[in-house]
Image (cartoon, grey):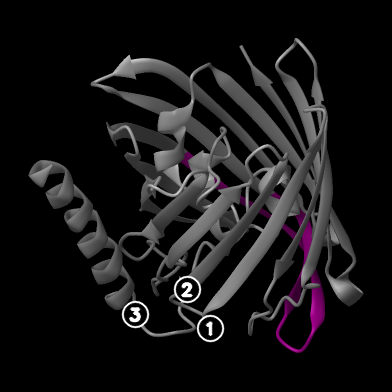
Amino acid sequence: MKKFLSLVIAVMVLLVSSYVLAGSPGSKGAVFLKLGQGARANAMGESFCAVADDINALYWNPAGIAQIKERQATFMYSDWLEEINYNYLAYVNPAQIMGGIMGGAITLLDSGSIDKYKEGGIADGTLDGKDIAVAVSYAKEMMPNCSLGATLKYIQMKIDGNKSTGFGLDVGCLYKPQIENLTLGVVVQNFGPKLKAFVSEKDALPLNFKVGGAYKFPNNPLTLSLDINFPSDNDTNFNFGGEYWIKEIVAIRAGYKSLTKDELKSSDLTFGAGFRMPGTGIGLDYAYCDYDDLGDTHRVSLMTKF
C-alpha cells in the first residue's frame, strides 16, 4: 500500500508541477494536438478522461488502456474545416509487456493547399501544410482499482518547406473508488520542451491538466461523464457528456463544452451515435460539432476488437 501511495503522489506532483511550469497564457504550438481523437469521445462533449474504457483512452487518458482485454484497432476520419483532413490510426495489444499493456497511434492533419501572399496582400501561389504525431503508450494496473499510464509523442509540423519538431509526454491515472460504478481520472497532456521552431523562435506545447469523473448507472445503459480542463494557454473550462446504449447495439450520445477564448469559436453542444455489430467486435461511431460561420465538422471512427 505504501508503495502504491508513493507512486500516486509522484504522479500528482508531476501533473501539478508541469502545469505550474507551463509558461504564460497564450503560448501555444502544435495546436493540432488539442483536436480530440475518436468520434465516441467527441460526441460526448470530449468528456472521456474518466471513461477511458476503450482504445480512445490512448489520447484522453493512457492509464485507461490497462483495462483492455482484447486487441483493438481504430481509424478516425474527420472532415475538418476549410477542406482540412484530420485522421487518426491506433492499435492496442493487451499482451503483457513488463507487467503492462502497450499501444501506439499516428495522428495526421493535412491542411492541403493554402494560398500564399507577399507583403501588401499580393497573391504568391500556394503552400502545403502537414502535421504529424507518432505516439507510443504504456499502462499498468497498480492495484485492482487503480492504473497508471504514459504516452510519449514525436511531433513534426511542415509548412512551405520548413519543419518544426519536438517531443511531448502525457501521464495519466485512472482510479475506481469504493463507490460502485464511479471512475475518476487525472491526466496531464502535452508536457515537454518547446518545439524546435520553423525559423528562429520556439513555441511551447499546448499543455493541459485535466481531471474527470464518470458514472455508469447500475442496471441502466447510461453513462455520464465530466471533465475539467486547466490549459496553459486558455481559461479553465469543462466538458460534460452522456452515452445511452440500446440493447448494446446502438448508442446515442450528446455533450456540452464550455466555450473559451480560442479564436476558433464552436458551438457548445455536440451530438453523435454509435453502432456495434453483434458477434463481430466491429463498431462504427459518428460525432458532429458546429463551428458557426466556419461550418460543420464530422468525425467517423471505425473500431474493431479481435
Please state which amino acid type lies under the numbered disc 1.
Asp
Residue 171: where, in percent of width, then height?
Answer: 34, 50
- Residue 23, label in figure: 3
Q: Which residues are magenta?
A: 110-134
Per the rendering, the mark at residue 231 is 2
Q: Is residue 272 magenta?
A: no
Q: Please provide percent x and percent y for residue 207.
A: 42, 66
Relative depth, front residue between 84 and 198: 84
State the quadrant of the N terminus: top left
Question: What amino acid type should be assigned to the residue bearing mark 2?
Answer: Pro
The location of residue 107, given as percent across then percent down, is 59, 42
Callout 3 environment at 10 Å: few (<14), some (14 to 19), or many (20+)?
A: some
Locate residue 225 relative to residue 231 in the image: left or right.
right
- The residue at 48%/39% (across/down) is 134
What residue is shown at x 45% (from left), y 64% (from top)? Answer: 210
Can residue 42 be spotted in the picture? Answer: yes
